[in-house]
Image: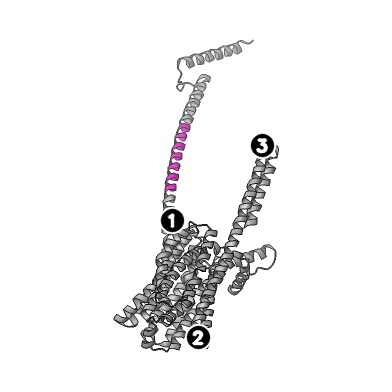
Amino acid sequence: MPSHVDSVLRNGAANVGACDNNDAEEPTPSLPKQRGSSGLGNYAAASSSRRRSRDLVDVEQQDDDDDDDDATADDKKEKGGRSKQTQQQRRGWMIWCLPFFSALIVFGNHYSRDLNGALQNEMQSDVPMSAFDFDSLNALYYAPNVITPLLMGVLQDIYTAPVVFLYTVCLSSVAQLFFGLGVQIRSLPLILLARGTLGLFYEAIDMGCIPITAPIFKEKWALVSGFTNGFLRLGSVFSFVLSPRLYASFGLSVPVWVSVAISLFALPLSFAMKTLASRYYSGEQTQKLSVKSSASLAAAAAAAAGGPETSLSIGQELLRRLRNAKSLPIQFWMYLLVGLFAYTALVPFYSVGSALLQRRYNLDTKDADFLMLLPEGTIAVASPILGLLVDYWGIRTRVFRMSVALICFVPVFAALSIIHHPDCPKVCMFLLGLFWSFFNAIFWGLCGEFCTNANQTGISIGFLGCSLNLGSSLLLLLIGVLQSGLSQVTADNAIVGLFSGFSALAAICSFILTNIVSHKESAASSNFAHSGSADNEVDVLLSGADSNRGQLLEFSNSRTYSTFESYD
């Protein structure tokens, strides 16, 4: 080996040994003063150690930051949950303002409706108007209600119910102002025009509240409807009690403008109802006035099928929905017949009852009017209490007890025709108010069960409103024919007989509805029982055939689904 190579090897070995000795004596090396292989090794080791230390510190710091972030996120989530719960509770309390506002609106609506009856003689003498003019005034007010509730209901299905209701109240408020102006300037044509316009919206306002409140308060609908009906009857009572006293003190204009002011209060209330409903539905059902999805869905379906896009006009959409009304269930139509016959017996009685009591029992007008208000006062007091009780009854129990209340109308009306004792009208009117309160609470409590059909709530309420006015209007025409063609005693007996007959028809329809509901409940119970036995069989099979678990579960789910589908 050459000498210079041997020298280089010895020097390298010495340097390596020196490096090992330095590492053992100084664990934390410093930067070497002279450049060489030992200095580079120490520098690299120190740099690696510092990097590892920094990485370790960074990892610990990141863990701490992650823990802080998790704690912050949990705090925010907890705060957000509490805030959301608070908002839901606040919204839950606020939503109960809807039935209260609805009750105030129908209070003013019926106060205005009965103003003419409370001031009939006064209006005829002060405007002035003849008896024919006054009858024309009532005919213009009530006749449109045979059609307008159905139109209102269909529009509420096409558009959003709170928005349509708000526009209806706005138009009615304008008509109220013109009616007050017509009375103020004693203009009979303006009074007739304004009163006829008000008739377009009277029943629409009464029924238009239901599609807004019934879907929200379906579980407590009997209580809500009882509360609303109580205020509704109070509107009539206040009108008959307050209006004559205001006329005696201030003349005709003051009670009329008081009625207008009470009715105009419905405008801010309806706007508040729209706002509350929009909060409840989270903007899904109460957007700006626009045609709902039916026309747009038809166009989209046509486009998806490769055909030309089609859009339905409002008239075509109305006709389409009227044709689709045949899909409403049988129990709805039977419920509608109950209301048709019951209100045909009850509503006309209020138009001719006072004169009938005066003729048959020699009562003066004041006493007869007081007896006619007795059922209204009974309904106003009893409806909220009965509504609270009705919510705890099953559907079949409600319908059966409604049938019993309807059948009780028959002997009450018959007693007015047969018994001539002077105390008979007092007892009969008290019993009539009691049975009517019972029927009224159950009938309108069932509205949430039979009229809130999917996408057809408005048209269901519209058909119901039309039926309630159609029968009473036709019977009033028939009463006029009887009174003009028969003697007074014979006509009175025939009229009371008609009241009893229509009450009996309503009771028969109600008993039929009871059987329909009972059959539905029995079918549902048997289907659920059959579904439960199928599930038990599946469980037994599963215990011995785990390999077929997926297929058996699929079979069980399909059986359960078909059971619900057949019941619906």
Q: Residue at x 52, y 84 (%)?
A: 482
**For residue 249, above or below residue 75:** below
- Of mark 1 and mark 2, the one earlier in the sequence is 1
Q: Amino acid at mark 2?
A: Gln
Pinpoint residue 288: horizontal percent, then vertical percent.
Answer: 50, 66
Pinpoint residue 108: horizontal percent, then vertical percent.
Answer: 40, 72
Residue that mark 3 sits on? 543
In this orientation, which residue lies closer to the viewer: 385 or 37? Answer: 385
Q: Which residues are magenta?
A: 58-82
In this orientation, which residue lies closer to the viewer: 347 or 459? Answer: 347
Residue that mark 2 sits on? 483
- Of mark 3 and mark 1, the one earlier in the sequence is 1
Query: Is 428 positioned to the left or the right of 554 in the image?
Result: left
Q: Amino acid at mark 3?
A: Ser
The image shows a total of numbered marks equal to 3
Mark 3 vs mark 1, foreground winner is: 3
Q: Is any part of residue 291 visible from this angle?
A: no
Res 92 label: 1
**For residue 542, above or below residue 349:** above
Q: Amino acid at mark 1?
A: Gly
Mark 1 vs mark 2, foreground winner is: 2
Pinpoint residue 327: horizontal percent, then vertical percent.
Answer: 63, 66
Q: Quadrant of residue 69?
A: top left
Mark 2 vs mark 3, foreground winner is: 2
